[in-house]
Amino acid sequence: MKVLMIGWELPPFNSGGLGVACFHLAKELNKKINLTFVLPQKLPLKETPFKVIFASDFIKKISSYLETNYLIDQDLYNLVFSYGERILNVYNEKPNIIHGHDWFSAPAVYFLKNYFKIPSFIHVHSTEIERTGNNPNPIIFQIEKEYFSKADYILPVSHLTKEVLIKSYQIPEEKIFVLPNGFEWIKNNTYQPNYLLNLKKDGWQIVLFVGRLTLQKGPDYLIKAIPLVKKFLPKTKFIFTGSGDMLNYLVKLCYELKIYDSVIFTNFLRDEKLYGLYCLADILVVPSVADPFGLVPLEGLNYDVPVIVSKTTGVGYYLNNIMKFDFWDIKEMANKIIGLLKYKTMTNLYLLNLKREAQEKFSWSKTADQLINLYSKCLQ
Amino acid sequence: MPSIVFYFKVHQPERLKHYTVFEIGEDHNYFDNELNKFYLDRIVNKCYLPTLNLIYDLIQKTQGKFKVSFGITGILFDQLKKWHPEIIELFQKLNKTNCIEFIGETYYHSLSSLYSINEFKKQVILHKKLIKKLFKKEPKVFANTELIYFDDLTFTIKNLGFKAILTEGVSWILGWQSPNFIYEDPNKNLKILLRNYQLSDDISFRFSARWWNEWPLTAEKFANWLENYNGNSEVINLFMDFETFGEHQWPETGIFEFLKALPFEIFKRKDLEFALPSEVIEKYPIRGIFSSKKPITWADTERDLSAWLENEMQKESVEMLYSLEKKIPRSLKETWRKLQTADHFYYMCTKWFADGDVHKYFNPYETPYDAYLNFRNVLEDFKLIINDKIKSKKQ
């Protein structure tokens, strides 16, 4: 079985979870089927465990598309709509299946599906509706709506996204197959700064947020919960890791709430610096307003930090053990944070059972097997 | 002539309200009246009312040959008194037929027998007094919370005036022996009636199970099975939650039709009868010793306490609660006892994946950790008010 997979980014040139998800999925698929992964333009990638080709030389820095919610300039537009044709310049054997990721690959998927006359899959890691809190960029929304409905199969990463696809995009339910992300349960090197190590030695506890500082991820709700937590546990620091258009507002909010002493903004961190924070944190809070899947909770569990999530975080759907709250319910969020910082009997048992469950449910080889099953079925 | 003994456990806990850390020191009312009334309304309409009326009818139609026993917790009576006194009246009406028997219980459906014999005795006596007040009868047969049994408890129960105890017919204790006889404990304190789990679960558990090769279960079929015990059994104990009728098994499953037809199918067959626990312990001789040093229960497949007391959250909160015993001022005793209800610890059970479906039943919490957090917050406040009372007394 020959599969052409159309991507947008791969680590370390990624802006978020999408590139990571693509990387692991492609790696596992490549063990069992013949896979070619294509990127829109040349990037200085090191060796990859699967075959990567580039549709053209470097054109434009595009890694920030996720952060500029309301900007889709002519260059980006052209890049998206010329993608399919450019792929043909570098790839001309006929695959059995074409599989794209998210909206920017969708026009290319449609173009190649027609060219090769083969079944097409679009993997939806998030929709514009979810990324923007139901305030979509109309151009992107239109591209999604049109090209998703032209694909043969739609693979959302969670049931939450499936519902959005049905409701807001009118995609017929029988075309949709939920394919949850996997996870690689391997601990990497970590860097733990002395400043934080010393704080911990002095008896401070750390609450961690990891994610883009945008509406979708709900960092403002966690900030609003901080005064409540401090009232019970004054020796608590809150670390916000990530960058985004909400930073200025959040800083202002901290000032208004008089909690600027308790909050640290680290900007976007990756690799050992990020993993080090997971190790140092006492609890990871994911207050997303809408998060189709959310790899952050699993990353946290990988480094043994107990995690709580909003009910609108997709990964929560799959984990029976996970504690959830409504993202707007600041009091309940604070209650759970305090509980987990205070009642360690519960915290230890919670982490143990939750991590065990997550490890059982999320692995990339499992996800890849599910996908290969789907491929085979549609080729029959 | 085997006697069929029905025992229905009738219980609803007083569930806690959503109680966050921010309520500690501020709000000393822990129970969710609205939620408890909501569950009670539902269970009254779906189960208590129709089933009790049906049982009354059956007693009338069989001229008193249909008999059943009830184990009703005090904490349920308290709620019925508040919101559904008509159910208490219905029990009183049934009581006048002399075809029902009330079994002794712990008033608060507590695990006190494992933590404080003193407290256990008090709760059993409280329950006894309540039954006496409402029904002018004194229970002679005892059933501990979730049918908990261990040998060392029998002496205490005997001294509380009971002649027999109900518990689970655990197969690995019985070995080749049958649960369908009267047993006694090794110290000869009490007679023991053992639940026939196969036949009990056929009704309470498998009745509507389409995967079961005996589905659908009819009264005729069930009566035939019972008839087969003729000649090798003396007492067949069918013990189950009363909610089996109308709640665990919905009316659509035909459970009420089953119950309606059962007495008449039984009487069609020779040598089968219904009897009350206090009757069978007089009627039949003791046929063997039943012994368990470790506590057994009727729960799950393990028949042990693991649904209540397996993980650290459960153990810690139970132990914390009972460690307060000596400090509790009189005015807080009732609250302390209501917190002892086993259901609070059941909600903290983490054995979700095997027995999960049953455990989720009527469970107001999303996860066992939420249950612990809520209970623990309440306990923190409770400890505060106890200390306040002690301080103000000293001054």
Image: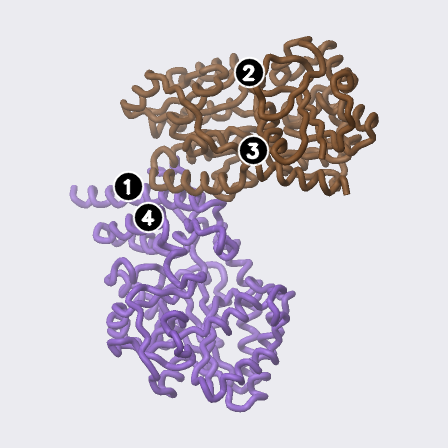
Chain colours: A brown, B purple
Q: Reading the chain from its start, which is encountered first: label 3 or label 2? A: 2
Q: Where residue A369 sits: x, y (%)?
A: 62, 40
Disc 3 from disc 2: Cα separation: 19 Å
Q: Chain of mark 3?
A: A
Q: Is residue A116 above or below residue B49?
A: above
The residue labelled by disc 3 is A313
Q: Of residues A220 and A157, which is closer to you in this image?
A: A157
For discs 1 and 2, the disc positioned in front in the rendered view: 2
Q: Which mark is residue B317?
A: 4
Disc 4 from disc 3: Cα separation: 31 Å
Of the residues shown, which amino acid type is indicated by label 2?
Gly
Q: Is residue A102 above or below residue B219?
A: above
The residue labelled by disc 2 is A244
Q: Which mark is residue B384?
A: 1
Disc 2 from disc 4: Cα separation: 43 Å
Disc 1 from disc 4: Cα separation: 16 Å
Pointer 4 local density, CA inside 10 Å: few below 14, some 14–19, many at least 20: many
Whether residue B350 sits left or right of residue A155 in the image: it is: left
In contact (CB < 8 Å): disc 4 and disc 3: no
For discs 1 and 3, the disc positioned in front in the rendered view: 3
Badge 2 element:
loop
